[in-house]
Amino acid sequence: MSAVADRLGFAYARRRVFEDLSFAVPAGMVCGVWGGNGAGKSTLLRVLAGVLTPDSGSFCMGGRTGFAPQEWGLYEELTVEENLEFFARAQGADWVGSDLERFGFALRGWQRAGELSHGWKQRLSLACAAVHRPGVLLLDEITAGLDAGAREAAWETIEAEAARGAAVLLTTHIAADAERCGMMLRLECPQ
């Protein structure tokens, strides 16, 4: 599946965030979305996820979409396993208990999401976005604040999803993450 945008534009009230933005991310590709604070990276992913409506242009997400927002969308009172099961079933996918191991949670399935450290919450957010095997995966600053081991574990999941055929869009400020992307989309701060 792929992610395609054609002359996409969005503004908050009178503040133009981006306009005439066009790109195509093919299946199996990890595309880094790079830009300074306020450049519209998170807004772009929210538009592509259907959370916000663009005011111009069009886009097409091939297949189901998985979205990990910058602020976690987890149910903190549920366990890790219950969160994964919920997100799988909410997207119409079968829950497979082996997904705990697939995402590195075999020993933490019983733990409540609210009890996890920042790094484990980031990893769970990524897992919840990918558990239903989407055609397009939207990841907003998914590696921010992770130590080297957790960042590598996140990248193993990201690369596995791309190898499976997902088009991945990943916002980042981390140069090492940008270097691992097969293509880059640079957003400039609006004037």
Image (cartoon, rainbow, N blue to C red):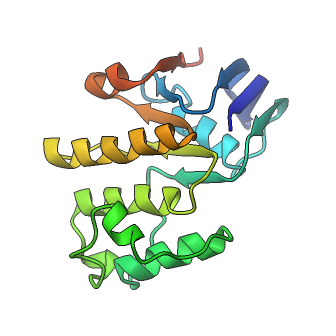
Residue 150 visible: yes
Please give left or right for residue 50 compared with residue 137 in the image: right
Front-lying residue, 175 or 97: 97
Which residue: 68% across, 23% down? Answer: 24
Front-lying residue, 158 or 97: 97
- Which percent across, then down, holds residue 7? 79, 20
- Which percent across, then down, holds residue 168? 53, 37
- Which percent across, then down, holds residue 67? 56, 52
Name the quadrant of the N terminus. Answer: top right
Please give left or right for residue 53 compared with residue 173 in the image: right
Q: Is residue 131 above or below residue 12?
A: below
- Which percent across, then down, holds residue 149? 15, 46
Please give left or right for residue 6 compared with residue 110 in the image: right
Q: Is residue 27 above or below residue 72?
A: above
Q: Which image quarter: residue 11? A: top right
Q: Which image quarter: residue 117? A: bottom left
Which residue: 66% across, 67% down? Answer: 91
Which residue: 27% across, 62% down? Answer: 104
Q: Is residue 142 above or below residue 169?
A: below
Q: Is residue 7 above or below residue 136?
A: above
Name the quadrant of the C terminus. Answer: top right
Residue 72 visible: no
Please give left or right for residue 143 compared with residue 74 in the image: left
Which residue: 46% across, 34% down? Answer: 171
Front-lying residue, 126 or 133: 133
- Tell me how many marks there are: 0
